[in-house]
Amino acid sequence: MSGRILVSACLLGQPVRYDGGAKTLQNELLDQWQAEGRVVPLCPEVSAGFPTPRAPAEIAPGTSGADVWRGAGQIREDTGRDVTETFRRGAQIAVAHARKAGCRFALLIDGSPSCGSTFIYSGMFDGQKRVGQGVVAAALREDGVQVFAPSDIEALAQALTGETRNA
Ligand code: SF4
């Protein structure tokens, strides 16, 4: 089917977040897309081998998800452990999964060092946000996937309608 959407598994109620919880999105559009068989769930971090729960991680100050994807940035846990390569593996899995399933759209939870698409955290574990995207969002966008945050779900619906009309 055209118009398939890669969706962060935690938005679909799967308890895969670093704290062992989910971040379920209650939304009629998402319910409709699930019923239509458009939704392709994925947690890139768990797919890359991280356990749940796991230590919180942030993209180092001064670097971005796009930097990490290009091999230049760094992601660290709050313990200081460098987990960059495992996050990059998660992004590689996401790109491969989107290609295989034919997803030209993604709906990803915001703020995550993987899935964030409009903001991420400072890298200092101080709760401060900054404009930016995670490594999965950067990788998918570089591969031509249109990435949306839950706050932009209406824009995703419009993009999807456009694609379905043109299909
Ligand atoms: Fe959710 Fe993405 Fe984090 Fe997995 S990597 S828990 S899907 S935000």
Image (cartoon, rainbow, N blue to C red):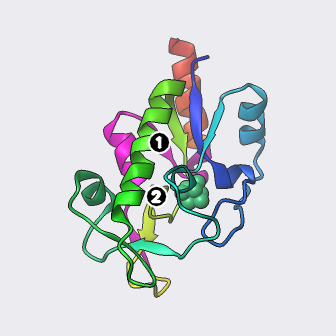
SS under mark 2: loop
Q: Position of residue 143 (x, y in %)?
A: 34, 35
**Alpha-carbon distance for marks 2 and 1?**
10 Å
Q: Is residue 167 above or below residue 24?
A: above
Check disc 1: other Cα within 10 Å, few if <14, some if 14-19, many if 20+: many
Residue 19 within the magenta-colored segment of the rendering: no
Residue range in magenta is: 129-153
Quadrant housing residue 78: bottom left
Q: Residue at x 41, y 58 (%)?
A: 87
Ligand 1 is found in the corner quadrant, namely bottom right
Q: Between residues 100 and 48, which one lies in front from this camera angle? A: 48
Q: Which residue is mark 1?
A: 94
Q: Is residue 71 above or below residue 164?
A: below
**Which residue, as the protein is rendered here, is positioned at the far bottom?**
126
Q: Position of residue 73 (x, y in %)?
A: 25, 65
Q: Which residue is mark 2?
A: 114
Q: With 68 as the anchor, is 92 left or right in this view?
A: right
